[in-house]
């Protein structure tokens, strides 16, 4: 069992029968009151992030979470097909509703992790940074880059990312999949 003071960032626990991960944690002490643990937690099944305070008398069950490396193959009719890296014949599907917002970074043949809770796959975890090819980019006009502005481009998965004005079509860019932000240009188009 976990006490409220064990809820540090990165800890998995069960709340109302659902697995959660602690993202942020801080103590709040007010005069003549018991200390309270202020947290920001993420539901690993729905992906929702909530803020919640916990009292000293609350205890929690440890969530048994496992990660397994898999390969994303393709998506078809709102279903995403994966296979095990060591055995491509072992395939399984996840619904688009299970993956949520991460589907905009799902690139065929990319390796990622699935999150298992009670031997059931509940979600996926993408690498923090991934490289994508820019397939549509408005032209940068000479002189625009002096101000350091941004423009919206479309990457190979269909997602739209804000990038600096110097990024062109066919460039390879690196994107942070947790924040959906451009980080750097990896390769300039020919």
Image (tube, rainbow, N blue to C red):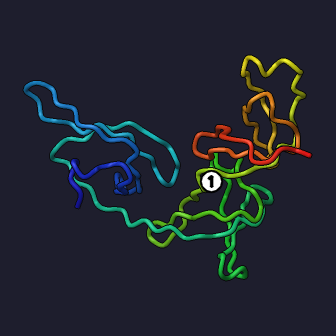
Q: Position of residue 58 (x, y in %)?
A: 20, 48
Q: Which residue is drawn at 61% across and 56% down?
A: 126
Locate residue 24: give its quadrant. Answer: top left
Q: Badge 1: few (under 14), some or many (20 or more) residues near its Cα, within 10 Å?
A: many
Say whether residue 82 is left or right of residue 43.
right
Residue 47 position in % (x across, y down)? 52, 48
Identify whether 84 is placed above or below 135: below
Q: Looking at the image, which residue is at 73% across and 17% down?
A: 147
- Is 108 placed left or right of 15 in the picture? right
Count of labels in the image:
1
Residue furthest out toward the left: 32
User: Residue 35 versus residue 14: which sits nearer the camera?
Assistant: 35
Q: Which residue is drawn at 88% across and 21% down?
A: 142
Residue that label 1 marks: 99
Q: In which quarter of the image is the N terminus?
A: bottom left
Measuring 81% from the left and 35% from the top, which residue is drawn there? 167
Task: Residue 41: give x, y in percent of width and height.
Answer: 40, 44
Taking depth in this image into account, of 144 and 122 the one nearest to the observer is 144
Q: In this view, does 118 lie above or below 43?
A: below
Direction from residue 87 to residue 152 in the image, left or right: right
x, y percent for residue 33: 11, 29
Q: What kind of element bears circle 1?
A: helix
């Amino acid at each position: 069992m976990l006490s409220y003071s064990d809820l540090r960032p990165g800890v998995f626990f069960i709340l109302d029968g659902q697995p959660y991960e602690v993202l942020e944690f801080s103590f709040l002490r007010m005069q003549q009151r018991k200390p309270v643990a202020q947290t920001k937690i993420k539901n690993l099944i729905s992906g929702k992030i909530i803020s919640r305070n916990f009292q000293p008398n609350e205890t929690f069950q440890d969530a048994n979470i496992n990660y397994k490396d898999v390969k994303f193959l393709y998506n078809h009719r709102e279903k995403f097909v994966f296979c095990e890296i060591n055995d491509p014949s072992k395939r399984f599907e996840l619904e688009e509703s299970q993956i949520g917002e991460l589907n905009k970074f799902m690139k065929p043949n990319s390796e990622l992790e699935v999150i298992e809770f009670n031997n059931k796959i509940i979600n996926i975890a993408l690498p923090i940074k991934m490289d994508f090819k820019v397939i549509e980019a408005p032209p940068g006009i000479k002189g625009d880059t002096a101000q350091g502005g941004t423009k919206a481009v479309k990457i190979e998965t269909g997602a739209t990312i804000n990038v600096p004005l110097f990024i062109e079509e066919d460039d390879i860019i690196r994107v942070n999949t947790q924040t959906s932000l451009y980080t750097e240009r990896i390769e300039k188009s020919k």
